[in-house]
Every structure is written in C-alpha cells, then in structure tokens.
Image: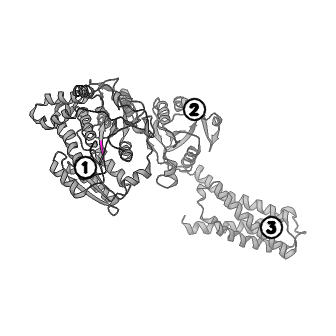
C-alpha cells in the first residue's frame, strides 16, 4: 500500500473512532441521554475530531512506521489523544460552564484502546501472521546489555533476517533467567558449549562492542569448542552514525585474538608533526609502507612522496590516495631504488621532506639467508643512502622501520636490520636530523607473514605447515604498526629504538588452529604438519637486548631502548668492502657484527 492510501485509511479510521467514542462514553454513563445535552455531545464530538487531527499533524501520527512501533510511538499516541481530550474539556467549560470529567475520561480510554490498538495490532499481524520464506537459523547472543537488546529487537522485527535469537549469555549474575523480548538469559560464558548443543545454535553473535581483546579471546575460546559460526556486532558508534546496521555482523578475525588492545595515539602531537608538511615514505607500495601512507594522509600533509622500486605497487597506493585525497594535498609517486644513491639524493634535494618513514627493505628471512649480499645492499647501504641524504638536506625526523629479529639475530635479515640501526644511530651523533628506529614484531597480513600463507593452505584443503609446535612470535596488526611509526616520530629526541608492549608472544600453532576454526573448518579436516625450523629462524623473538632494556614507558605501551655504543669502523668496512667477498663470508660477518657489539667495543677500547 502506497503512502497516500495508507494515510487516508488511517485518517478515516481515526475519524470514525473519534466521532463516535464520546457518544459511547455518554451512553455508558447514561443510556437514555437524559443527563447531558445532545447539543453538547455533538459539539464535543466535532471538537475532538478537529483537535485530534491538529495534534496528529503536530506529532506526525500518520508518518510512523507502525509495523516497527515501540514505546516511542505509544508516547506519541498518548500526547495526541490527551491534548485533544484537553481541548474538548476547554470547549465544554466555555460553552456550558461545566466539564464532563467522567465522560471525557471514558472517551480518553476508548481513544487509547481503539487508536493505539489499531496501530499495534498491525505490528502483531505483521510480526506473527505474515510468514517469511527465509529459513531461520538459531542464534545465541553473547551480552544482554544495551547492544544485545538492540540486536535482538532488530532481528525479531526483521522478517527477512536469516537469524532467530533463541538465547542470551551474560556473565552478570543479576541477569540470569531474565527475559528480554521473549529471549531468556540461559547462562554465563562458561555455559556456551552446553547452550549451543541444547538449543541447536547455528550462529553465535558477540554483542558487547566494548570488549577488550583479552576478553574477546576468552569468549572465543569457549565458542571454538562448538561448531557454531562466531561473529561480532559492530561498534555502537558506527551504528549510531549510520556507518553500519545493527545486524551487519563481521567475522571474528585473527587480530581480535591477539589478547592486546591497540595503542591509543596522541593525535594532537602527530597532527602537529605531519599537518601541512612534506612526508616521504620509502617502500610506499609495501604492506607497512602503504598503510603508513594511509595513516599519514588522515593528517592532511602538504605533500606526500610515495617512493618505491615496484611500479605496480606504487601505482596501486597512488591511485588509492588520489581517489580519496586528490583535492586535499599533493601526491607524488616516485619510482626509485634506495640503492641508487644519486637518485635518492636528487629526490631529497628536489622535495626537501620534513619527515621520512623508511619502510623499504628486504624482510623475508629464508630468502635473505640465500642472498646475504642483496640484504646488505638493500637493508644497510640503502638505509645509509636515504639517511645521509636526509642529513644533507636537513630533514627534521627520520624513522627507520626495524624488526624484533634485530635483537640477538640468528639470521641475515635480522643482522642487516640491526646494522641499519647502527648506521642511523651513528649519524644521529652529529646530525641535526633526529634519527630513530621502531622495532615491530610480526605484522599480521603483511607480505611474507604466516597469515596469507595459512589462508592459501586452508583454501586448497590443507595441511597447514608449521615449523615447530613450540615456536612463538610477537604479533601486531598493520594499522597498529603504522600508528606506532607515526607516534615514534613525535617522541623522537634522536638515537632511540622504540618498541611496542605487544603483550605475550603467541604460539604459531595456536594461530594456525584459530585460523582453521575462523575459516569454518576443524583441525581434523585441514590438518597441521610440522616442517622443521628453516634456515636462520629462531624459536622465539625478543624486542630488546639485555643491554638495551629501559623499563620506563615514554608513552602508553611504547618503550624506548637505551642507546648502545658500537664499533662503527667494522660497519664502515662492511659497507665499503662487501662486494669483495663471497656470500658465505658476508653472512658470517654480518651475524658476528650484529651480535658482538660489546666485545668489539671492549677490544677497540683496549
């Protein structure tokens, strides 16, 4: 039924109710109409008719979607009816000098019952009698708070939804056995497996948007004991602002199970550092580099320079940023190799950036074991080229993206990253540029990380290959890593190595098991195969060496390592003579150089 027909029907129905309800009220009190004047009855009836439609217009009574009616719509009816009855009472007082209170009270009740009843009966008919063709799946709602209540209400009134809420779970003892919209709170988090079995639950929805990562991890451990699909309700802020609907759930992601809440940024200090400035990102087409570009763009720089060696990846991030920020600041894609010293110096001279985020590097551990000279060329000499160009042309801050593998390194990649740290720490001693490094753990979803590999293995039916059942790693998300880079730039005094408090390290095999469950499979269906530790890999990673540890946090969840003196003459020798030696000699040299700083320093002093 279209809008005009619907309004006409409601207005006609209300008019009949209003015109005759006062007659019914008079009749109930005096069946023979001997007490009250018939003329007064007619005047009151017409007054009610006019005033009802006036107040119905004021309160938009005919603009409501009554199939979704709730307390708010009931309040609208109460106001409209009450004010129209009040108007009739005033007219009675003016015309006859008396107000027929009992008659008007009965009329008020009739209006409420008939007008209100006609609206809410439509909601009942629609909700109970109109059958949906969609086969409903039983859903368990975790959280009987405001978000869970909102979700259940939405699911119950939406006949097109494939989910039917059949039970709540909430750890609040006061809510146990309570019913909300007919859905009962049947237990606590620990009871999830038995409730899923007894109620034949197909979907579990976590409806507590304010949960910490640790709490989500705890709840998911219980959900993972069942075969039900687990999803998360969106943030209340996103629902209120209209970004998403209440019933637009998302899958639980590996990032939700890290057990650590993201670092909150000092937006003001970052904005002061980046807004209206020229920012250079090397490796801008990579996983970390491209995310840094996205994060930096939010602070409206004057110019952002996207520097990278890969044509396709630079083109991709360039087009992405142009689609969003074309008219807000200048975006300049630069195809350049950081090993090309002249080219890097030319870029610096032309654009004179205020801040550099140096993300360009070779990061793949086993590949660098086979190609140590390339690791030195890119990670050490490339870093030296960019850093010395920054020093020459007066860049304010230079932030090196380093790795937890630079701590007590057992591989070429980690060793060259540690030597790159030495390069910038040496430069910082005599430069006006503030040189700092930021160490990451493993970044979920980045190129070369285990998550994309595991997903591909699951897609082909498994098995997932894990190197060792006891191997652990620190993990963080790509956005989290990128934000840490920007925050470190604002904290820089020069020479520091910043690290993130990443909580407890995660077993790789546990990550694999979670990803299998999140993909809708069981461990038995996919399988896990142990392949053995690869060349250069460590069983566990560290974020700071013993001689670097400083227990003071310089920012919530961000720590800074103490500067460590190094024998830089051997770094210089490596950079000057690496081409004169074979790969095996270079591999041993960088490992020794990165691991024996203190011994070398003592030898030099003596």
Decide which of 137, 296 is in the foreground and name it: 296
Using the image, tell me which numbered label, if any, was put on residue 23: 3
Q: Mark 2: which secondary structure? A: loop
Q: Quadrant of the C terminus?
A: top left
Instruction: Give the camera-side residue of 122 and 541.
Output: 541
Left or right: 321 as drawn, with respect to 251? left
- Percent across and percent down for residue 245 are 49, 51
In the image, is residue 538 above or below residue 30? Answer: above
Q: Position of residue 452 (x, y in %)?
A: 30, 38
Q: Taking 355 as reference, is 574 above or below it?
A: above
| Mark earlier in primary sequence (2, 1) | 2
The residue wearing badge 2 is 188
Q: Nearer the viewer, residue 522 or 396?
A: 396
Q: Secondary structure at mark 3?
A: helix
Q: Nearer the viewer, residue 500 or 85?
A: 500
Q: Secondary structure at mark 1?
A: helix
Which quadrant is the N terminus positioned in?
Answer: bottom right
Q: Are the residues tagged 1 and 3 within 8 Å (C-beta)? A: no
What's the distance in space between the residues labelled 3 and 2, CA to CA? 56 Å
Coloring scheme used? one colour
C-alpha gap between disc 2 and disc 1? 58 Å
Q: Position of residue 470 (x, y in %)?
A: 35, 23
Q: Are circles 3 and 2 on residues that touch, CB within 8 Å?
A: no
Q: Identify the mark nearer the N-term, 1 or 3.
A: 3
The answer to whether mark 2 and mark 1 are in CB contact below 8 A is no
- Circle 1 sits on which residue? 390
Viewer-side label of 1, 3: 1
Q: Residues within 10 Å of mark 2 (few under 14, many from 20)?
A: some
**Which stretch did the figure color magenta?**
393-400
């Amino acid at each position: 039924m279209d809008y005009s027909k619907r309004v006409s029907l409601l207005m006609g129905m209300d008019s009949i109710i209003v015109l005759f309800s006062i007659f019914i009220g008079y009749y109930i009190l005096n069946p023979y109409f001997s007490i009250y004047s018939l003329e007064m009855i007619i005047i009151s009836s017409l007054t009610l008719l006019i005033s009802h439609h006036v107040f119905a217009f004021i309160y938009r009574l005919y603009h409501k979607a009554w199939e979704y009616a709730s307390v708010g719509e009931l309040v609208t009816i109460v106001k409209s009816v009450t004010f129209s009855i009040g108007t009739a009472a005033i007219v009675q007082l003016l015309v006859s000098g008396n107000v027929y209170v009992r008659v008007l009270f009965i009329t008020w009740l009739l209006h409420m019952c008939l007008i209100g009843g006609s609206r809410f009966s439509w909601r009942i008919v629609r909700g109970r009698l109109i059958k949906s063709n969609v086969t409903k799946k039983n859903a368990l709602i975790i959280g009987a708070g405001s978000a869970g209540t909102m979700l259940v209400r939405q699911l119950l009134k939406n006949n097109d939804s494939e989910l039917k809420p059949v039970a709540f779970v909430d750890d609040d003892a006061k809510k146990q056995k309570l019913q909300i919209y007919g859905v009962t709170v049947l237990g606590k988090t620990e009871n999830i497996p038995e409730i899923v079995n007894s109620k034949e639950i197909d979907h579990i929805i976590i409806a507590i948007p304010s949960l910490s990562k640790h709490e989500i991890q705890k709840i998911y451990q219980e959900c993972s004991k069942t075969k039900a699909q687990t999803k998360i309700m969106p943030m209340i802020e996103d629902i209120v602002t209209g970004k998403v609907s209440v019933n637009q759930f998302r899958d639980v992601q590996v990032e939700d199970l890290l057990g650590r809440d993201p670092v909150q940024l000092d937006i003001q200090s970052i904005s002061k550092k980046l807004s209206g400035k020229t920012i250079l990102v090397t490796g801008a087409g990579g996983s970390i580099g491209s995310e840094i570009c996205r994060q930096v763009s939010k602070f409206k720089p004057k110019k952002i320079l996207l520097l990278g060696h890969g044509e396709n990846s630079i083109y991709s991030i360039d087009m992405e940023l142009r689609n969003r920020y074309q008219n807000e600041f200048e975006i300049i894609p630069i195809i350049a190799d950081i090993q090309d010293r002249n080219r890097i110096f030319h870029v610096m001279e032309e654009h004179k950036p205020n801040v550099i985020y140096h993300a360009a590097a070779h990061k793949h551990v086993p590949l660098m074991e086979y190609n140590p000279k390339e690791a030195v060329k890119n990670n050490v000499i490339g870093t030296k080229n960019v850093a010395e160009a920054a020093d020459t042309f007066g860049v304010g801050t230079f932030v090196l993206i380093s790795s937890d593998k630079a701590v007590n390194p057992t591989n070429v990649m980690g060793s060259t990253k540690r030597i790159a740290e030495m390069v910038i720490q040496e430069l910082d001693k005599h430069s006006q540029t503030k040189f700092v490094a930021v160490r990451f753990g493993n970044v979920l979803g980045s190129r070369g990380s285990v998550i994309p590999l595991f997903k591909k293995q699951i897609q082909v039916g498994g098995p997932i290959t894990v190197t060792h059942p006891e191997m652990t790693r620190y993990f963080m998300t790509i956005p989290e890593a990128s934000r840490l880079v920007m925050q470190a730039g604002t904290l820089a005094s020069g020479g520091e190595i910043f690290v993130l408090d990443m909580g407890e390290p995660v077993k790789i095999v546990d990550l694999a098991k979670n990803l299998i469950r999140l993909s809708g499979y069981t461990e038995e269906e996919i399988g896990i195969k142990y392949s053995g530790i690869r060349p250069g890999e460590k069983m566990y990673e560290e974020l700071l060496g013993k001689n670097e540890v400083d227990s003071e946090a310089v920012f919530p969840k961000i720590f800074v390592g103490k500067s460590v003196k190094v024998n830089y003459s051997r770094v210089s020798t490596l950079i000057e003579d690496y081409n004169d030696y074979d790969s095996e000699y270079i591999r041993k040299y960088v490992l020794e150089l990165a691991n024996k700083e203190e011994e070398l320093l003592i030898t030099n002093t003596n």
